Image (tube, rainbow, N blue to C red):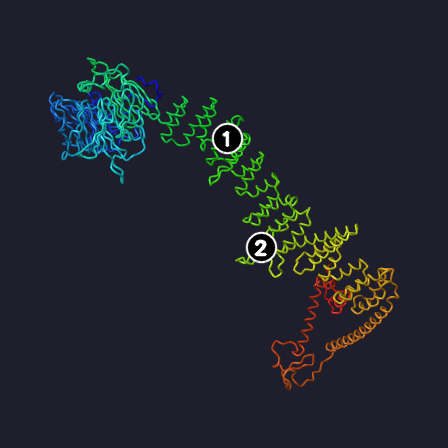
Amino acid sequence: MTSAFRLRRFNFFVQEEIPQLPAVFAEPGLLITSTEGRPGVSIDLGPPPSDGDPGSKSPPPNRTWDASDSAGYLFLGQPASHQVHVVDHRFAVRSFSTTPGLEGSRITFLECVPEANVLLTINESEADTAEPPLVRVWHLDRVFKPDYQPVVVPLAHFPAVPCPVTTLAIHPRLEQLAVGFANGLVTLVRNPLGRERHIRQKVLHTASEPITGLVLALVPPPADDDLGADTAKRPSGRAVRFQTRSGTAAQGTSPPCPMLYITTTSQIVVADLTHPLRETKTILDEEGCALHNSYASGQAELVVARDEAIYFYTPEGRGPCFAFEGPKLSMRQFRDYVVILSRPAGGLDRIYGGESTAAVTAAMTDPARGAGTVQLQVLDMRNKLLAFATEFEAKHVDVVSEWGGLFALARPTAQDDALTGPPPPVLYRLEEKPLAGKLDILYKQNLYPLAVKMATHHQYNPESIAEIYRRYGDYLYSQDDFDGAMGQYLQTVGYVEPSYVIRKFLDAQRLNHLTSYLETLHAQGLATADHTTLLLNCYTKLKDEARLEKFLQQGGEALQFDVETAIRVCRQAGYARQALTLAERFDQPAIYLEIQVEDIGDLARSVQYIADRRDDTPEERAGYVERYGRRLLEGLPDATTDLLIETCAPQNQRESTSNAADGTVPRHPNPRRFQSLFVSHPQHLVRFLETVADRRWGDAASDPAEGDAGDRRAVWQTLLELYLAEWGRNTRLSEATADAAHGERQRAAAKRAMALLRDPHVDYDWDQAFTLCDLAQFDPGTTWLYESREMYQELVQFYMDRDDVETVVQLLAQHGTRDPALYTEALDYFVSSHTVLTTHGEELAPLLAKIEQLNLLPPLQVVQTLSRHSVAQLGLVKDYLVRCLTTERALVDQDERLIASYREETNTMRQEIVDLRTQPVVFQSTKCSSCQAPLDLPSIHFLCKHSYHQRCLGEAEQACPRCATENRLVGEILRNQEATARQHERFASKLEDAPDGFEVVAEYFSKGTFNHADMGEG
């Protein structure tokens, strides 16, 4: 063909010869058709053939393909013998006879209608007389049953002058049949052909040229055009037929309209067969086509082949065309392809244009006409390429599709041999390569756009299509076509690892390409933080502030970048304003403040920003202030202090607390967290803590919040420390400069410190407060703390250390009775200093009188106290000692008299015991000591001189009832003494706690406790 050089040629098909064909394939004039791989055919093949049936045995397995669908069949018709051979996928042959209905007729058409499960045959007479062609409908599920008779449809309208049938078209449900003749006549048969009754016939069209094609199309409701759709239909070897994708109208939609396309050698007409009584015809073109050069596409279009191109027609008129030059023997469709048979240039005697009816008839009846080489080309109009091309040395080639491939039956052109006969035909199978194989072919030729188009059409998985784009990009990149390469890499986003592409374009001269790729990553939501960083760096290096702003101003839910990363990169590149805008827009307060404070330095705006964030929790606001408070205090101490106050104790805190539905107190940050911020601002710290304390704990009637006790104590402790520091600083300045202002501030600080210490509602830590006052030498605070704890000894000692005798005397008068130990300390103080004794010697006598009155010290210890110091003389305490000695002597005399009395009683008791042991006892009692009745026998007498009736005593009583209580008491005392002798820890504790240890020892001796002690241990 002259157009072959214009199209790329590929080997997308594998050609193989089918060996060991059954003998039926060698029969002369064989007609061939198939089910075209469409479902619906069901054949009852009957019993297997006998060994004597020639050509009916299944040949040995010889196929190299794997038929995925084995339900199809090939149908071979022998015109002369009227035999129809059914060939299955194993090439097993079953045959049935179609006995001629006409004398001297032969089968001229063989057509399978899978949707109706029928085979249609047409018999035509070979005589010169005008006999009507005989149409017979064979139900394939019954053809092998005995005595089966087909449905016979004799044509009522046929040419008066004998001429052959050139083409036919049949409805998939057998509702219509159109038959075209070589003289231009078209006969239409209506109503189901599967029944012989109620069949209506009419002449539909009469032309002056031969009918070269009939195509029955069921036009569906309007749909998008699709050239060469997947569900393509085909013309049979000598008839054209069409069905919709489903074969029937979709449920709930209007039924499709039957449209019959009629082609002649010089005209194309469409007839609307919707109305059974008035068909309308429209001329679509004044040019026709040759025989076997038309078929119906999957979109109810008529496809027509002419020498210069392939044209598409709809019922509305001619549509687009596809340039493909050269004469064509036949054309049919296979999947997405157009299969064209042609003769090489110069070897074709065309039947086209002005050919007469006789020429057409001769072409159909003379198989040898145009013998030579037949070229088969598989055209892909969608992708504008030749998918396959081959040549056969044959005088005639029939092409059918079945079992997933194309079959070409080539009848050789060699002359008959007298010995061997005519050469047998050859059956070739063309199997389409898998998509992966076709793509490999395209890869080798760097035809990546075509590979993408092909893979997309076949609904290849997205990952594989992306791989094709990647290959294409790599190829363009190797050719230094960076723009084109990036265009392909952009198609791989989401499937190819981004780092693969990024590494190729990291060069500074290719940043524009890299930027485009990174923008696509972000647009599809596939970017990571690293990608965002890289993209923003590209913008900054390119100084493309416009694209940077556009990128950063994206909004909506589908945000295309990581905000924190974008902010970080903008800051690093010096775009602080853009970073600030991002932080504010996407509510990143921590980052916003960091930029505002550290990069821009707008402290006032920072303070206002924190103050305006009313919806933040107190803890969040505390975090902001805690981080940047020091810087803010340096620039704006007053405003920052106010901000801190509002953070820890909002102005409306009390109102919100009282109005709280559940009565809970809202938790606010601990003021202690912010004290370190005020290192250089003590005055502001005082204001901060005073205000917070007043707002949070100033209401004495309210209960403190849970967990606030520690905060309160810390705040007041810090305030006290600040007051004392202020007092000490102004004290030193006042002494150094004699400035009245410093003195005033000193007194104010002391007043505030004392007010805090005296406030009963201030729960400060006493120990820490005392330490602070002591270190600051703040005497008013120290003495107050002593008094608040009733630590009179320490208070007196405090004034003793300062030689404040008057105050010491006053304290003795006020607190001496509550703490007598003050007198002993005062005695030691008065006699320790000559000055004190000289100036306040008159206080010594009353002091000693109190010691004597309260018996605080024995005289000896008083003397020892005086002897420790060389200040006081013994004459000062002469009267005291005389009184003490006199009193002691009187006590000694009293004790001696008591001892003599005890000794006398003891001796008397001992003598009684001796008498009881050695002398007889005379019982003179005449009455019972229990019942006071006169004694009678039996009676019992005790050594204690008590007598009882035996009946008045219990059986087990062994002691005198009247003396038993006293005896038990004495026994209990003795047992207690024995137990006490073993309680060493108790003795040691009493000895340690007693003011006079000797008295404890004397008590233990007096009770005889040590008599029971085990002195041998230890």
Viewed as shown, does residue 914 lie left or right of 606? Answer: right
Residue neighbourhood size for the residue with mark 1, other residues' Cα within 10 Å, grouped as few (<14), some (14–19), many (≥20): many
Numbered tag placed on residue 652 in the rendering:
2
Q: Residue furthest bottom?
A: 934
- Report which quarter residue 759 is drawn in: bottom right
Numbered tag placed on residue 515 in the rendering:
1
Q: x, y percentage for residue 720?
A: 69, 54
- Per the image, label 1 sits on a secondary structure element best described as helix
Name which residue type carries label 2.
Asn
Residue neighbourhood size for the residue with mark 2, other residues' Cα within 10 Å, grouped as few (<14), some (14–19), many (≥20): few
**Front-most of 212 and 887?**
212
Viewed as shown, does residue 346 lie left or right of 535? Answer: left
C-alpha gap between disc 1 and disc 2: 53 Å
- Per the image, label 2 sits on a secondary structure element best described as loop
Q: Are marks 1 and 2 in contact (CB under 8 Å)?
A: no
Residue at x-position 83% and y-position 69%: 884
| Mark found first going from the N terminus, 1 or 2 | 1
Nearer the observer, disc 1 or disc 2? Answer: 2
**Front-most of 319 and 815?**
319
Q: x, y percentage for residue 1001?
A: 76, 66
**The N terminus lies in quadrant:** top left
Regarding residue 641, the answer to whether it shows in the image is yes
Name which residue type carries label 1.
Thr
Numbered tag placed on residue 269 in the rendering:
none
